[in-house]
Amino acid sequence: MNFANHVDAAARDRPDATALSDPTREVTFAELAGETSAFANAIAELGVEPGERVALYLPNSVAFVAAYFGAMKRGAIPFPINMRFEGPEVEYVLADAGATAAVTHGQFEDAIADVDVDSLEHLIVVEGSRGRDYGDLVASAEPAHFVHPRKEGELAELVYTSGTTGRPKGVRHTHGNLSTNARGLIRYMGWSRRDVALTVCPCFHVSGLNVTTTPYLVAGAANHLLPQWDPGTALETIEEHGVTYVFFIPTMVIDLLDHGRIESYDLGTLETIGVGGSPMPRERIEAVEETFGVTLLEGYGMTETTPLAAINRPNQEVRKPGSIGPPAEEVVDVRIEDPETGDVVGENEKGELLWHGDTVTPGYYDLPAENERAFVECEGKTWLRSGDIARMDSDGMLFVEDRLDDMLITGGENVYPREIEEVLYGLDGVAEAAVIGTPDDRLGEAVTAIVVRSDDSLTAADIEAACRDRLTDYKIPRQVEFAEELPKTSTRKIDKVALRERFE
C-alpha cells in the first residue's frame, strides 16, 4: 500500500486536529491532506510521472512535508537533499537520482536553479522568484487526488547519506519499510494522538523524517517543526505547544544543558527525550533526566534501517545507561560477528552489528558494487553490515562501543575512542570531547584527545591523570589538544573525518 494513504486516513479520523506547524504557519490534518493532494495534481499537470524522482531542498517546514507526501501520492519518489550540500554536491545528487523536479525555498533557489542536470525539468520554489511558485501551483490545483497504487516492496523514498566518507549514497526505502518503521516506533514508544512532538533534527535525514515526522502522522498526533537548531527556540517551542516527546542528537542535549536558562521555561509537558545518531555520553544522562524531569531513552538506527533497529522503551523493566536498548525484535534480527572471521561473538564480546528485517533497506540506489560490500548472506538471510562495533549483555541489552572506521591501532593494540571519551566527559571542565588517532612514527597512531573546555583551568596534565586512573596505559591520550569548538556534520554529530584532517 502507498504509504501516503496515511495522510488521508488521518484527515478522515481527525480532520480539525493540528497536524503540523512551523514558525510561519500551522495546518490541520484535513488541510495537510488537501495540500498534499493539490501538490500531487500540480506536478501531474507539469508532466511528472509515477516513478520519477522529486528532489526536496527545503528546511523543516509544512511545505517540506506536503511536497514529500504529495510526490508520494502521485507515485513519484521524493528524496530530500542535505541542506549543507552546495554546488557540485547538489548537482551530483540531482543527477544521481535522475530528478525530474525539485522543490526549494527562495532563500536557496540559486543552489538548484544554477545546476546543470539534464533530467531536471521543473523547479518549484516556495516564496521565491525563480521557477514555478509553490503557493500558486497548490492554490490552482484540485484539492483531491487518487493516491497512486503502490505495493509494500516498491520504492517509496530515497534518503542520501551525508557523504562524509565518500560520495553520498542513495538509500532506498520501500513503502513497507516506512510503514513498519512508523508502526514499530508507535508500538514500542506507546505513542498515541495525545502526544506532541518537536522535530528539529533535519528532515533530510531519517532522524527528522522517520523518527518523528512520518510516525506521528500515522499516529494522528501533532508535530511541530523547526528549520534550524537553536536551544532557546527549541525550549520556547516545547513550552508553547506542550511538547511531550523530542528526539535529539547528543550534541543538542549538551547544548541544552549548557544553555543556562532552562529554569525560565515551563517544560512540564515534556515526558521523554529520545537520543540517537551517536552515543550519548553516559556521564550526562543523569544530569539530563534531573534537569528536565524526563526519561532519556537512547535508541539506535541507520539511514539503512529507516531507522528503527534497537530502542529503549518507556517503562521497560531493565534500563541501563549507555545502552541503546534491546533489538526491536518484532521488526529486525541482529547478529554480532567478529569483523575479521565472520564468526558470531559471545555474550559481552565486541563485534560488528549486522541487521536483517522489515526496516532494512533493499539496497543502495544504482550502486551494485556498494550493495555487494554492504550485504552478506548467512543462515539463509541477507544481513546488512552496519560498521558499528557493539556487544550484547546477559539481559539482551545492546551497547554500541564505536564505529569500526573510528577504531585506531596504537602499538599493535585496538583502541575504541568511545571508551576514552566517556572518561573525558566525566571530568569537570569538559564541555565536549573527541578522540582520534594521529600519525606516530613509533606507535603507528597516537591516541589524541581534542577537548572543548568549559573551565579554562583544566590542563592536559589533569586529563592525562584522570585517564591514567581509569584506563590501561595504551589507551591514555599521548596528545591533548584544546579547541574552541568541534566540527559538526549536518545532523550535529561530531565530525571525526574533519577532525582527523585538521589534526593530521
Image (cartoon, helix red, strand yellow):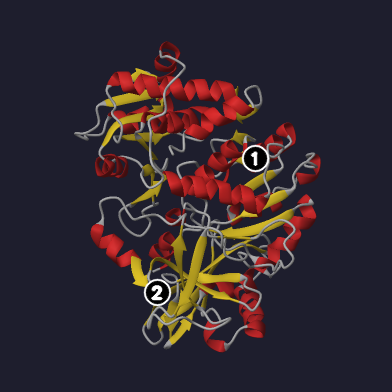
Count of numbered tags? 2
> Residue 435 at what x, y percent from top left?
51, 70
Depth order, front residue of 123/342: 342
At horizontal 68% and vertical 37% (from top left) the residue drawn is 193
Q: What element does badge 2 sit on?
A: loop
Q: Is residue 241 above or below residue 426?
A: above
398 w.r.t. 299: above or below:
below
Q: In which image quadrant can residue 50 be found?
A: top left
Front one among 107 and 179: 179
- Residue 197: assigned label: 1
The amino acid type, in three-letter code, at marker 1 is Ala
- Mark 2 to mark 1 CA distance (whole Å): 40 Å
Mark 1 Cα-neighbour bin, 10 Å: few <14, some 14–19, many ≥20:
many
Q: Amino acid at mark 2?
A: Glu
Q: Nearer the viewer, mark 2 or mark 1?
A: 2
Tell me what residue is drawn at x 72 percent, y 62 percent. 316
Displayed quadrant of residue 12: top right
Element type at marker 1?
strand
Q: Residue furthest top?
A: 140
As drawn, the label of residue 450 is: none
- Mark 2 and mark 1 lie on one chain; the one further toward the N terminus is 1
Q: Quadrant of residue 68 in the image?
A: top left
Q: Which residue is mark 2?
A: 379
Q: Position of residue 247 (x, y in %)?
A: 61, 48
Vertically, is 270 above or below 30?
below
The front one of 345 and 25 is 345
Q: Say whether residue 20 is visible.
A: yes
> Residue at horizontal 73%, vertical 32%?
240
